[in-house]
Image: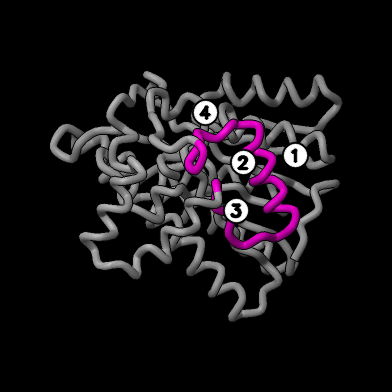
Amino acid sequence: MRHPLPGATFLVTGGGSGIGRLLSLRAADEGAHVVIWDLSASAGESVRDEIRARGGHADSYAIDVTDREAVKTAAEVVGPVDILVNNAGVVTGKRLLDATEEEIERTFDVNVMALYWTTRAFLGGMIERRHGAVMTVSSAAGLVGVAKQTDYSASKFAAFGFAESLRAELAKDATGVDSLVACPFYIDTGMFAGVRTKVPRLLPILDQDYAAGRILTAIVEGRQQLVMPRMVGVIPAARLLPVKLFDRVMNLFGVNDTMDAFTGRGRDLPDTTGPAVR
């Protein structure tokens, strides 16, 4: 199924910065009415005003997507949505014993539980209208565990499973609604500032404009799974190897060294992309 943007209501969580901002701008340029949900009122309003200044249509709401009651209330205000992009995400970048209990819980609240609250808020209307799409931004870290990402990687495995199970459920019930998932490697939004890649030709740090364009194209074309770059796509096949050999291959490509110099944004806000080996 294709999901054309002109005239569509396009809601992005974490739309105030990073990939969320770029998706919002691009969708508006293509004729969508963009709805931005972001924890930061000022960040969301800034993107809204940027879109309006370019002649587009946009609204912004300060929403904590981990608060299911707030999500329900805001969804009632927004009304029907044609395309939902579950994009908000956070990362600690800490070893298991260094992360606080609160940080671990927050990672799962934002990266996993929020998927349920936002999708449940709009999916029923999509099914009634028999059209719509839910794009979940997972990560390459949702396909392979990475050192210093025990919380983030696990949450992105969950996001991938959520999108895949939802896809099967919607198809089985012949709803006419798509569940799509994107699994990018690190994106240069700043959320993963300091990360390094050992093999930039095969596993490059992704340009954010390029990544946003690929994700938006996947939505329009109804592409059920987007993996960036192509090298990430070999991970499922590599799992046929014995575990020790699989681990050696991942180490050969430096996957578990990527977070060694991680610094992150330096601010504690739900961001918009979070691709750690995402």
Residue 121, image x, y percentages: 56, 55
- Secondary structure under tag 4 reads loop
**Alpha carbons under labels 3 and 4: distance apart:** 20 Å
Query: Of label 3 and label 1, which has the lower sequence position?
Result: 1
User: Which residue carries the number 4 mark?
Assistant: 188
Query: Of label 1 and label 2, which has the lower sequence position?
Result: 2
Q: Can residue 181 be seen in this view?
A: yes
User: Which residue carries the number 3 mark?
Assistant: 135
Query: Of label 2 and label 4, which has the lower sequence position?
Result: 2
Q: Examine the rendered structure and indicate whether residue 218 appears above or below residue 52.
A: below
Depth order, front residue of 173/206: 206
Residue depicted at x 63% and y 50%: 84
Answer yes or no: do the residues labelled 2 and 3 have beta carbons within 8 Å? no
Q: Nearer the viewer, mark 2 or mark 4?
A: 4
Residue 116, image x, y percentages: 46, 56
Residue 78 picture quarter: top right
Query: Of label 2 and label 3, which has the lower sequence position?
Result: 2
Query: Of label 4 and label 1, which has the lower sequence position?
Result: 1
Residue type at numbered disc 2: Val
Q: Give the range drawn in magenta.
A: 201-229
Residue type at numbered disc 1: Ala
Count neighbours of disc 3 (C-alpha within 10 A) and say few if under 14, some if 14 to 19, many if 20 or more: many
User: Which residue carries the number 1 mark?
Assistant: 27
Answer yes or no: do the residues labelled 1 and 2 have beta carbons within 8 Å? yes
**Alpha carbons under labels 1 and 2: distance apart:** 10 Å
Depth order, front residue of 259/247: 247
- Secondary structure under tag 2 reads strand
**Alpha carbons under labels 4 and 1: distance apart:** 20 Å
User: Which residue carries the number 2 mark?
Assistant: 12
**Alpha carbons under labels 2 and 4: distance apart:** 19 Å
